[in-house]
């Protein structure tokens, strides 16, 4: 397989952003396929991951013109990736990265058939996940919702037709990145 796009997905709090940041430091030739969002930037966002503060009007206009390959509304914010950005990534010398919710991985895989390698980051124990979310400052009600989402997402991924490479993030970030790198080399 000629991998041009690497997708990373998994429930909130499993360390996707941290793992991808470390992966990009280990493989500086990797870059993001930029997604658009209506939400403001967060300190945890990686450089080049999003174009932030897109107005709902601009988002609707792009959607109306069918410029998006996919869109989703999550936690009151809109997210989407432009078809043109994905097509451009397919022509790059090195693979491009995307951190996606599971429902959007299939869109990318269909559009770039045979050129996508998809990773699913499995959560650590619920106790560890709860501690991570608390450290991030999440509201207790949101934490419980996210833990329930975590169970659901993991079960769905395990039953999915998407050929995920499953990486459990219950050790160090370096261990998780080593696992990803091993699959990228293979």
Image (cartoon, rainbow, N blue to C red):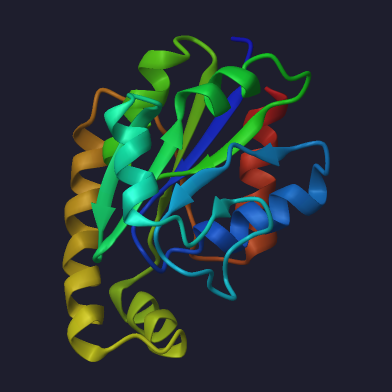
Q: Where 167 sits versus 3, above or below?
A: below
Where does residue 2 sit, x and y in percent of width and height?
A: 63, 11
- Above or below 30: residue 79: below
For the point 44% across and 80% down, the residue is 132
Q: Quarter holding the N terminus? A: top right
In the rendered image, residue 121, in percent from the top left (x then y), is placed at 44, 50
Q: Residue at x 59, y 37 (%)?
A: 33
Q: Which of the two residues, 185 or 139, is positioned nearer the viewer here?
A: 139
Q: Is residue 132 above or below residue 18?
A: below
Q: Is residue 181 visible?
A: yes
Measuring 38% from the left and 61% from the top, which residue is drawn there?
Answer: 123
172 left or right, relative to 69: right
Residue 163 visible in this rendered orientation of the protein:
no
| The quarter of the displayed image where residue 141 is located | bottom left
How many numbered circles are shown? 0
Residue 130 horizontal/vertical position (percent): 33, 81
- 118 horizontally vs 20: left or right: left
**Residue 98 vs residue 14: left or right?**
right
Task: Specify whether 70 is left or right of 87.
Answer: left
The quarter of the picture where the C terminus appears is: top right
Residue 175, image quadrant: bottom right
Establish if 40 lies above or below 127: above
Q: Quadrant of residue 183?
A: top right
Say which of 180 and 34 sits in front: 34
| Residue at left offset 53%, top offset 69% | 41
In depth, the one of 27 and 36 nearer the eye is 36
- The foreground one among 170 and 84 is 84
């Amino acid at each position: 397989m000629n991998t041009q796009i690497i997708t990373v997905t998994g429930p909130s709090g499993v360390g996707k952003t941290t793992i991808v940041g470390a992966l990009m430091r280990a493989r500086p030739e990797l870059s993001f396929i930029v997604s658009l969002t209506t939400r403001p930037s967060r300190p945890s966002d990686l450089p080049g991951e999003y174009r932030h503060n897109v107005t709902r009007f601009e988002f609707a206009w792009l959607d109306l013109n069918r410029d998006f390959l996919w869109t989703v509304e999550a936690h009151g914010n809109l997210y989407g990736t432009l078809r043109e950005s994905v097509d451009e990534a397919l022509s790059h010398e090195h693979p491009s990265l995307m951190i996606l919710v599971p429902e959007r991985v299939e869109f990318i895989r269909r559009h770039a058939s045979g050129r996508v390698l998809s990773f699913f980051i499995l959560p650590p124990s619920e106790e560890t996940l709860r501690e991570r979310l608390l450290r991030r400052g999440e509201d207790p009600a949101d934490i419980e919702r996210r833990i329930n989402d975590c169970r659901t997402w993991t079960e769905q991924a395990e039953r999915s037709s998407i050929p995920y490479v499953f990486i459990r993030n219950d050790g160090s970030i370096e261990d998780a990145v080593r696992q990803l790198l091993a699959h990228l080399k293979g």
